[in-house]
Amino acid sequence: MPSRPRLAHPPRPEPTPRQLALPLGPPEALPSTTPPAPAITLTTQQVWTTLSPTAKAQLRQTILRILQEVVHGAPES
């Protein structure tokens, strides 16, 4: 089977103020000796129980704001 040509990755855009910069480069930049991490499956309830009351309140506010933007459109800045 012939090998497929490798596509060059475009340069990463600068993150906006609401985005986090990812610390990792393209997959081929990782050493080939790095074993893949095992897959872990968590339920929503398992994640929720690990959050502090403050984190839960912040998450509720964020979800509410997202739902309001979906229903009413993006807020005017």
Image (cartoon, rainbow, N blue to C red):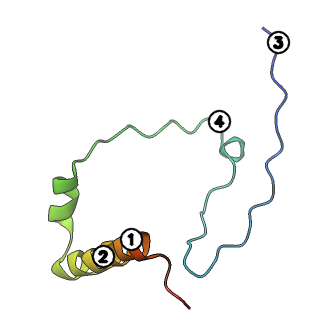
- Where residue 16 sits in the image (x, y, percent)? 64, 77
Q: Mark 4 points at which residue?
A: 32
Foreground mark, 1 or 4? Answer: 1
Q: Which residue is drawn at 81% across and 53% down?
A: 10
Along the polypeptide, which appears first: circle 1 or circle 4? 4
- Mark 2 or 4, nearer chain start: 4
State the residue at coordinates (81%, 18%): 3
Give the residue at x 49% y 37%: 36
> Which numbered disc, 1 or 2, marks the residue that appears first in the sequence?
2
Query: Which kind of residue does numbered mark 1 sit on?
Result: Val
Q: Which amino acid does label 4 sit on?
A: Ser
Disc 1 marks which residue? 71
Q: Name the residue under label 2.
A: 64
Q: Where does the N terminus fall, quadrant-wise?
A: top right
Q: Front-most of 5 and 77?
A: 77
Residue 56: x %, y % from top left: 21, 75
**Is label 3 in a helix, a strand or a loop?**
loop
What is the CA distance from the residue labelled 2 to the residue labelled 4?
42 Å
**Callout 4: few (<14), some (14-19), or many (20+) C-alpha neighbours within 10 Å?**
few
Q: Is mark 1 on a helix, strand or loop?
A: helix
Q: Specify the amino acid type for callout 3.
A: Pro
The Cα–Cα distance between marks 3 and 4, rounded to whole angstroms, is: 21 Å
Q: Name the residue under label 3.
A: 2
Q: Look at the image and tell me in which quarter the C terminus lies.
A: bottom right
